Image (spheres, rainbow, N blue to C red):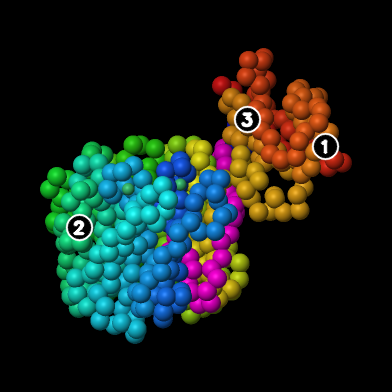
Amino acid sequence: MLTLLLAAAPAGATDLGLLRTLDGTAANGQYAIACEIVGDMDGDGYPDFAIGASADSTGGDGAGRVFIYRGGPHLGEPPALVLTGLPGDLLGASLAAPGDIDGDGLADLVIGAPAGTTVSPAAPGRVLVVFGSSTLGARPTLAIAGPAPGSRFGAAVAGLGSFRGDGYADFAVGAPDAGNGAGLVEVFLGGPGLGTAPNMTLHGRAQDDNFGAAVAGAGRPTGGVFTSLLVGAPFNSGASVWAGRVYLYAGGAVADTVPRAVWSGAAAGDFFGTALAAAGDVNGDGFDDFLVGAPGANVGSLVDAGRAYLYLGGTALPSSPAITIAGAGAGDELGLAVAGVGDVDGDGHADFAAGAPGNPDANTAGEVRFFYGRAAPSAAPDSVIAGEAAGDMFGLTLSNGAQVLGGSRAQFIVGSYQHAGAGRAYLYGARAGVLGVFADETRGARLAMAPPWPTPARGAARLSIVVPRAARATLAIVDVGGRRVATLVDGDLEAGHHEYAWPVAGTVSAHPGLYWAVLEAGGERVVRKLVLIPR
Ligand SMILES: [Ca+2]
Ligand SMILES: [Ca+2]
Ligand SMILES: [Ca+2]
Ligand SMILES: [Ca+2]
């Protein structure tokens, strides 16, 4: 019976929750059109994150702004650094977290400012590199200009990790409108030699391909030392009109200049390669996996329902996807965003998500489908998160994932740049063990207990509680027969957050089975289920 229960409900399957929302303040500023967890930029041990608002007009019409927030104990504080673009820049239309570009041990941020608006139609677009420093903003940014007027250089940016394999992080910038829309991608290699000239340039094949409309690091899909680069050309018509194509270039001391692999959209108008993302190792085989979105794909008679594909790495590059995720309704445009969101439940498998924001003209709220990694990945989502209001297009933007709160479990950000006219960002993560961060649990200051973690537990499970005011409290473990098998608290507790573990280390271990953690204080009572499995 226990085995059946576990098979039906994988660990953490219902554990995803909203930790926090952050709101744009500029009307029509498109806050959260790009969101990225950068890594630890200030060296305090917690990853920091950036949110772009490319239409924010504080710096002039179409200037854009980027807000950098600190993670960990500083979560919830105002942004530590705000960068403001020049008129027409669209600063913050794209963001990338390459890692450490200059080798000082602090994470650096790449910001795209593709321009191309009526404010400055001849601007080539540009990219800003913001270097980490113990006080954010203390170091000058590096500005890199695009190759040609109107090329929309910076429409897409991507961290590649160690593409050249020298330990410095490298990055790629797409200019999809360069060369009559054929598009190009410039690769910049980190290290002491980093300047404003690219180390490598890759070109689209045909006019209007929009090569470089999406770029992504692919990690190490076939193992080895060097990382790989994915480039999307969603308007490529090589297979059929606007089916789209995705190209993979392997890094190295001498990197590929011709693609090592090419994948095409299945049908005309699929726009395969509109979104790309590294997924990390979803199935735990040691090879990195990646995601491709095709938001224009029809699903049966459902026009533009969209599809997203998970490709698994291996000793050879995959020729076809391992799973296909299909949009559920006409105009869902699933695959406009795809993301590897890190290991949200801490089980060692990287988890991932696909956004279905809906058609921009259809006034849709949007949704995000979330998937836990596992040895045999499934196309059935573990969670579906819906947007708040019609017109939000929730899920057009998905960030990568990292441990913003510390510990072993990752968080990620969903963007809804249309929400309430100014935009909203949503930080999601596993609920267990991070009690006190979730908005709904701090609200009203009630007695609370997070779901025990891990569940099921092979060893000790962690119990996190919040006592709203000093009170006499009891925390007991009760078995299915109603017998109290352990008493963890029986006395006065200070107000605040308290942590316990059960079974207590060094005591006679409890039998595998189903238990209840029962917390009572100040006339309130909270009960949580706890499952122990054999060691
Ligand atoms: Ca930090
Ligand atoms: Ca750095
Ligand atoms: Ca894998
Ligand atoms: Ca996982």
Residue at screen point 42% across, 75% down: 59
Real-space CA distance between mark 3 and mark 2, rounded to the nearest whole angstrom? 50 Å
Residue at screen point 61% across, 67% down: 388
Q: Does the magenta stretch include residue 344?
A: no
Task: Point out residue 296 in the picture as x, y percentages from the top left corner.
Answer: 38, 70
Label 1 sits on a secondary structure element that is strand
Q: What is the three-letter code of the residue carrying label 1?
A: Ala
Label 3 sits on a secondary structure element that is strand
Quarter holding residue 76: bottom right
Residue in front for this viewpoint, 438 or 317: 438
- The residue indicated by pointer 3 is 461
The label nearer to you, 3 versus 2, is: 2
Task: Point out residue 453 in the picture as x, y percentages from the top left corner.
Answer: 61, 35
Q: How many callouts does the rendering have?
A: 3
What residue span does the magenta drawing correspond to?
Answer: 7-35
Q: Is residue 286 above or below residue 123?
A: above
Real-space CA distance between mark 2 and mark 1, rounded to the nearest whole angstrom? 61 Å
- Relative horizontal placement of residue 150, taking residue 351 as reference (left or right): left
Task: Point out residue 63 in the picture as x, y percentages from the top left corner.
Answer: 39, 75
For the N terminus, the image quarter is top right
Residue at screen point 25% across, 75% down: 124
Please say whether residue 114 is visible from this viewpoint: yes
Q: What is the three-letter code of the residue carrying label 2?
A: Gly
Q: Is mark 3 within 8 Å of ligand 4?
A: no
Marking on residue 195? 2
- Relative horizontal placement of residue 367, taking residue 90 as reference (left or right): right
Q: Earlier in the sequence, mark 3 or mark 2?
A: 2
- The residue indicated by pointer 1 is 471
Residue in front for this viewpoint, 180 or 80: 80
Label 2 sits on a secondary structure element that is loop
Q: What is the three-letter code of the residue carrying label 3?
A: Ala
